[in-house]
Image (spheres, rainbow, N blue to C red):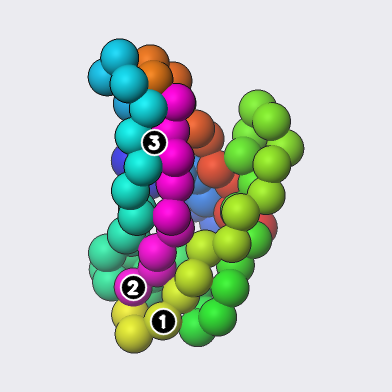
Amino acid sequence: FARGDAQQRVIVVANFADAATRFKLQLPAELVDQWQLQTGSVTLTELFSGHQLPLQVGSGVAVLPLTVKANSALVFILP
């Protein structure tokens, strides 16, 4: 899920399965518009690890390739 306000934008991804999963997370056009994401790459920071990943924005959508470990979650903060 995604939440945000004028101060902070957050994307949370959870994997409740007993195996890791790999997929492309796609943010809908409505969210891209609401958050005013510009075409190009936006750096996301994972809250707990500090690891940074590029969110690719283009054609009204944003895509982030992810691998999520079994029974875990990732929390990304947007600048």
Mark closest to the chain's N terminus, 3 or 1:
3
Provide residue 24's location: percent of width, then percent of height.
Answer: 34, 55
Number of numbered discs present?
3
Q: Pointer 1: what residue?
A: 58
Q: Is residue 14 visible?
A: no
Residues in magenta, as a range: 61-69
Element at badge 2? Answer: strand
Q: Which residue is rendered at x = 40% and y = 64% of the image?
A: 63
Provide residue 77's location: percent of width, then percent of height.
Answer: 59, 46
Residue with the most extreme right position: 50
Provide residue 40's location: percent of width, then percent of height.
Answer: 55, 80
Examine the image and state in which quarter residue 28 appears: bottom left
Q: Pointer 2: what residue?
A: 61
Q: Pointer 3: what residue?
A: 13
Distance (Cα) linking label 3 and label 1: 21 Å
Decide: few, some or many residues near mark 3? Use Cα within 10 Å; few <14, some 14-19, many ≥20.
Answer: some
Decide: few, some or many residues near mark 2? Use Cα within 10 Å; few <14, some 14-19, many ≥20.
Answer: some
Picture layout, residue 13 above or below residue 45: above
